[in-house]
Image (spheres, rainbow, N blue to C red):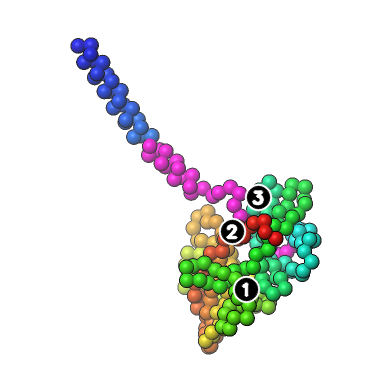
Amino acid sequence: MKKILIVLLAALLVLAAVACKAKEEPQEAAKEESMTDEPLAGGWTPAEDYEVTEARQAIFDKGMAVISSIHTPLAYLGSQVVAGTNHCFLSKGSNWLELVYFYEDLQGNVQLMNIAQLPIVPQADGTVTAPEAGLMGGWSYVEDPAFTPEGEAKLEAALQNQVGASYVIVAYVGEQVVAGLNRCLLCRVTPVVPDAQPHYALVYVYEDLQGGASLSQVIDLDVGAYCTYGA
């Protein structure tokens, strides 16, 4: 009789443990799922405004002190908090537009990290590459990245039927002459959902020979992917 009771008691304990485990597993899964929805610490934060202020110009000048060629900052794109701060600028070099990265330590010292050509040529797989100089019919950087009110109006017209995100033009960065004109715009994109995180994207607009404009495609641009020590 004692052996039977012991066996029954052991069976009940096993069943209780299994039930408890089954109850805990959904809670753990829910916890893991909620953790993946949280923004990652240390990620890049797009700038609220792109003006190259006096303070931002000082960062650029400090970091570029080791470079003899001329580079002109056009817009401040964002920052990343590390043990100090990483900064990203859109800049104009001698023959191209570029992403320039600096590391600023806690004492205010600035080090150039990398200068990367801004990729603007769309590929079939959804990526972008830098344009090839002198390629007939290919993409090229614009001489003046400033966007005119007329050009901005055409972009707004091209996006008027788009829903789900708002677009803010940072710069007009590239073009391709076809039967009309393909334009590439660097934009700050914010999805129209609660607590949405903004990001950068290359927005492509086709302008026909009659002056009409239509959206061709949008390709996300991960500015953090070019923040490496390579200058």
- Kind of residue indicated by mark 3: Val
- Residue linked to disc 3: 81
Give the extent of the magenta segment. Answer: 25-53
Identify the residue position indicated by label 1 in the image: 173
Magenta residue check for 136 = no
Residue at mark 1 to residue at mark 3: CA–CA distance = 27 Å
Q: Position of residue 160 (x, y in %)?
A: 50, 73
Residue at (57% x, 69% y) in the render: 129
What is the three-letter code of the residue carrying label 2? Ala
Q: Position of residue 202 (x, y in %)?
A: 56, 69
Give the mark nearest the N terminus, 1 or 3.
Answer: 3
Tag of residue 225: 2
Of residues 179 and 172, the one drawn nearer to the viewer in this rendering: 179
- Sort mark 3 into few (<14), some (14-19) or many (20+) by Cα contacts within 10 Å: some
Residue 36 falls within the magenta-colored stretch: yes
Q: Is residue 70 visible?
A: yes
Q: Position of residue 126 (x, y in %)?
A: 49, 67
**Distance Cα–Cα, label 2 vs label 3:** 15 Å
Q: Earlier in the sequence, mark 2 or mark 3?
A: 3
The picture quadrant where one finds residue 135 is bottom right
